[in-house]
């Protein structure tokens, strides 16, 4: 058999462990509801995962394709099949030995249309600050002159009409609640008497007076730091945990909360010690998760960066950066990031900045601005390292030492100001890095994922090993990911792009041509994106949509709020009429990257998550492309289980993934501990190997194109830990591997090897 570890009936009956062996992410939509997920359970169980990770399941805006726009925390979403459908899915999963992990959204709710779908918000708009729901939302009533700004109108002068019988104010198809006793007033007085002011959507940038999610005014922040608000917004989720429907929780955007640690402590107490909890927390390269947080760890972007980086060539990445700067005129990474931060803070987040500056006072306002721009992390936490000397120096150089010192003192003595400052910092980092600078700085697109360091994308083998050892020691149950619903490019696309660092000449001439006239920056993005995507179904429209989004996010020639139609009309010209493939030598390097990244992800410390469909070759660009309906390779898995040898890269990846997932589930003790293994010989730097002392050895090929150019492995050998070793999948050798093994023998059939101690 090609796959050595299958799931037996006895194994499927074993109670699911508290810590998942692995998770599998499913994107639920009205087109893929609970019933569709239930139909996929037999396949997913055979794949070897232990937990199904569901995108948000609570009631959301009708038709929502993601579910993060929650409208009612007390109900399971009817469009997905309601609570009955969710409980049926949980029961079907349990029968196969699987459990569910729920993605929950504590930070924000939707400002939906119709507004009454969000009942707490509707009541606040009707009753004002005296409403029992007013404590739910961060509203600065004073800044709005006693009204909540609602930037929901398409035009600044849309007409209103009053329906006194229904108790509503109408503007087109939108309805707003009327404040008691105001329905008989003349329209100008009636509008002035409401607890809200409907406004043109562009006013949000400067006049918004409620906390929102990033720059999205359709998502209003929720004050879960209030115990009553926490209880109301978490009652249904906690009921599902208590009833055994959910065994784990993923906490979306924990940085957006006023006091994440206190929130997590309250959640841990309510959910119980047996509930596996991870947080979506973006960590900068040198940043660590606060050790006091009562969670298993993060969702895994920190692991993604290390896995990507260890397959990136330092010299090649530097050469690409120089070529990109020369051909596009883009300034260095740090300058690009700083410039983007200033633009976003003073533009898209001007309302949030204004709130902080008013609270700080005129003299400290410059310090507020410059400290936010200079911060290298999403937000600082008590007990953490705090702003480093370089951050403070940069801020003081622009704002003055007195202003910066004054803001630091204010942060220490005013918890409310500190919380809002931290929440704004998180939004600023997300919007200025993820949604602007990452689209402007594009010499190596595989490096522009959250948590990455585009200015220094490569990770050495030593750094990778140090990271894994630290993770095994401090956060062994933390999540790891390679592809998610939020990655700008799937792991397989990034693997192909990263191969370019081994042969940067493949990008020569990429700056030629342009949309709406010469645009070398977007032409470069188009070239790398086309190489990363390769020949896939609907290649042209998918690539064109991603390039349009890239141009708008970069904000250099067009934007979401002020699109340049003439310029955008030329973007399609950048899409090659035919598929663009890597040269054969780099195609083999991409194969080594795909399989190597897969191996490290599934063998390293942590709980690996497989994104829907990515057990097979999965090439996707930024959302919504990466949220397309999953194609489960049922027939390919059945063929592998029947003994058919893997013939394509997709089948190789599926065989490797399934073997390791099944091994993780059947023999979790194998994946305990961590120790690097060092090869010796002329090509030792190309071997990345480690052992899990419980009984696993993982061996991956780094920079395989450079390896081939240098003459291959030659007599490079890897000393194995004591014991006989057999492959976890694929053809078995004539005799087990023992002692020192030549890599030409160990990697004779492929660029990676996963070995399990025999006996």
Image: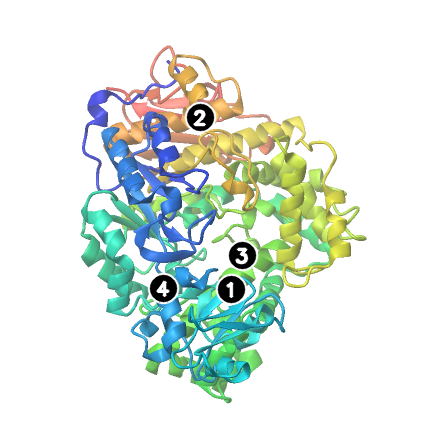
Q: In the rendered image of this protein, does residue 122 appear above or below residue 409?
A: above
Q: Quadrant of residue 536?
A: top right
User: Going by the image, does 133 lie left or right of 700?
Assistant: left
Q: CA distance from mark 4 to mark 1?
A: 15 Å
User: Residue, x 36% and y 70% (percent of image)?
Assistant: 123
Q: Earlier in the sequence, mark 1 or mark 2?
A: 1
* Relative image position of residue 329 (x, y in whole percent): 73, 58
Q: Give the distance between the C-alpha atoms of the residues marked 1 and 2, in whole angstroms.
A: 49 Å
Instruction: Name the element at disc 1.
Output: strand
Instruction: Identify residue for label 1.
Output: 174
In this rendering, does residue 654 appear at all?
A: yes
Percent coordinates x, y for residue 185 in the rendering: 48, 83
Structural distance between the alpha carbons of marks 2 and 4: 46 Å
Give the camera-side residue of 291 and 564: 564
Q: Residues within 10 Å of mark 4 (few under 14, many from 20)?
A: few
Q: Nearer the viewer, mark 3 or mark 1?
A: 1
How many residues crowd around disc 1 within 10 Å: few (fewer than 14), some, or many (20 or more)? some
Looking at the image, residue 152 lies above or below residue 398:
above
Q: Earlier in the sequence, mark 4 or mark 1?
A: 4
Q: Earlier in the sequence, mark 2 or mark 4?
A: 4
Label 4 near label 2: C-beta < 8 Å?
Answer: no
Q: Quadrant of the C terminus?
A: top left
Secondary element at tag 4: helix
Q: Earlier in the sequence, mark 3 or mark 4?
A: 4
Q: Is residue 671 above or below residue 244?
A: above
Residue position for label 4:
119
Taking the view exactly as shown, the residue that stands out farthest to the front is 165
Residue 208, position in %: x, y? Answer: 50, 74
Q: Mark 2 or mark 3, which has the lower sequence index?
A: 3
Report the side of 190 relative to 237 (left or right).
right
Q: Which mark is residue 654?
A: 2
Residue 434: mark in rendering: 3
């Amino acid at each position: 058999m090609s796959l050595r570890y299958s799931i037996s009936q006895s194994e499927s009956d074993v109670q699911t462990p508290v810590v998942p062996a692995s998770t599998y992410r499913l994107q639920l939509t009205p087109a893929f509801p609970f019933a569709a997920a239930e139909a996929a359970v037999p396949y997913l169980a055979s794949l070897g995962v232990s937990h199904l990770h569901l995108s948000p399941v609570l009631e959301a805006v009708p038709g929502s394709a993601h579910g993060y726009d929650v409208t009612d925390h007390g109900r399971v979403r009817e469009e997905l099949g309601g609570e009955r459908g969710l409980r049926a899915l949980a029961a079907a999963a349990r029968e196969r030995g699987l459990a569910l992990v729920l993605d929950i959204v504590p930070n924000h709710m939707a400002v939906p249309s119709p507004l009454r779908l969000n009942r707490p918000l509707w009541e606040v708009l009707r009753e004002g600050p005296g409403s029992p729901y007013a404590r739910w939302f961060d509203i600065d009533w004073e800044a709005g002159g006693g009204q909540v700004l609602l930037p929901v109108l398409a035009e600044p002068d849309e007409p209103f009409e009053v329906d006194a019988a229904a108790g509503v104010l109408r503007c087109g198809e939108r309805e707003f609640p009327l404040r008691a006793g105001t329905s008989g007033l003349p329209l100008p007085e009636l509008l002035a008497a409401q607890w809200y002011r409907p406004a043109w959507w562009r006013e949000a940038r400067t006049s918004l007076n409620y906390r929102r999610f990033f720059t999205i005014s359709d998502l209003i922040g929720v004050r879960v730091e209030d115990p009553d608000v926490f209880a109301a917004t978490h009652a249904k989720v906690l009921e599902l945990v208590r009833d055994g429907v959910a065994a784990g929780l993923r906490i979306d955007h924990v940085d957006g909360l006023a006091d994440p640690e206190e929130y997590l402590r309250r959640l841990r107490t309510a959910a119980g010690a047996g509930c596996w909890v991870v947080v979506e927390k973006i960590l900068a390269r040198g940043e660590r998760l606060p050790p006091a947080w009562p969670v298993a760890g993060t969702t895994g972007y920190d692991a993604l960066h290390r896995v990507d980086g260890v397959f990136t060539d330092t010299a090649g990445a530097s050469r690409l950066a120089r070529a990109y700067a020369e051909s596009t005129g883009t300034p260095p990474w740090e300058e690009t990031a700083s410039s983007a931060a200033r633009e976003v803070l003073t533009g898209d987040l001007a309302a949030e900045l204004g709130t902080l500056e008013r609270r700080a006072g005129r003299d400290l306002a410059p310090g507020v601005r410059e400290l936010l721009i200079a911060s290298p992390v999403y937000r600082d936490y008590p007990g953490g390292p705090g702003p480093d000397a370089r951050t403070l120096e940069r801020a003081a150089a622009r704002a003055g030492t007195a202003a910066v010192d004054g803001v630091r003192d204010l942060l220490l003595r005013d918890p409310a100001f500190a919380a809002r400052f931290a929440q704004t910092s998180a939004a600023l980092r997300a919007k200025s890095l993820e949604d602007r600078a990452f689209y402007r700085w594009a010499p190596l697109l595989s490096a522009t994922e959250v948590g990455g360091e585009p200015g220094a994308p490569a990770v050495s083998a030593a750094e990778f090993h140090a990271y894994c050892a630290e993770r095994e020691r401090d956060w062994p149950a933390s999540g790891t990911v390679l592809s998610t619903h939020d990655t700008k490019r799937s792991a397989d696309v990034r693997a192909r792009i990263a191969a370019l660092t081994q042969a940067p000449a493949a990008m020569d001439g990429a700056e030629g041509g342009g949309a709406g006239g010469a645009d070398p920056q977007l032409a470069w993005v188009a070239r790398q994106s086309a190489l990363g995507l390769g020949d896939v179904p609907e290649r042209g429209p998918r690539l064109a949509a991603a390039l349009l989004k890239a141009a708008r996010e970069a904000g250099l020639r067009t934007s979401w709020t002020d699109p340049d139609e003439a310029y955008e009309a030329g973007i399609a010209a950048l899409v090659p009429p035919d598929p663009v493939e890597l040269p054969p030598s780099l195609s083999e390097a991409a194969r080594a990257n795909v399989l190597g990244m897969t191996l490290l992800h599934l063998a390293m410390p942590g709980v690996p998550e497989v994104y829907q469909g990515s057990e097979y070759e999965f090439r996707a660009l930024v959302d919504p492309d990466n949220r397309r309906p999953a194609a489960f390779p049922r027939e390919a898995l059945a063929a592998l289980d029947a003994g058919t040898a893997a013939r394509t890269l997709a089948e190789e990846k599926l065989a490797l993934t399934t073997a390791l997932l099944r091994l993780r589930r059947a023999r979790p003790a194998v994946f305990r501990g961590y120790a690097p293994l060092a090869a010796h010989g002329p090509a030792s730097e190309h071997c990345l190997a480690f052992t899990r002392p419980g009984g696993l050895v993982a061996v991956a090929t780094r920079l395989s194109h450079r390896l081939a150019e240098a003459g291959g492995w030659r007599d490079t050998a890897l000393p194995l830990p004591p014991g006989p070793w057999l492959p976890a999948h694929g053809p078995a050798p004539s005799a087990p591997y023992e002692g020192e093994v030549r890599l030409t023998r160990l990697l004779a059939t492929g660029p990676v090897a996963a070995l399990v101690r025999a006996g």
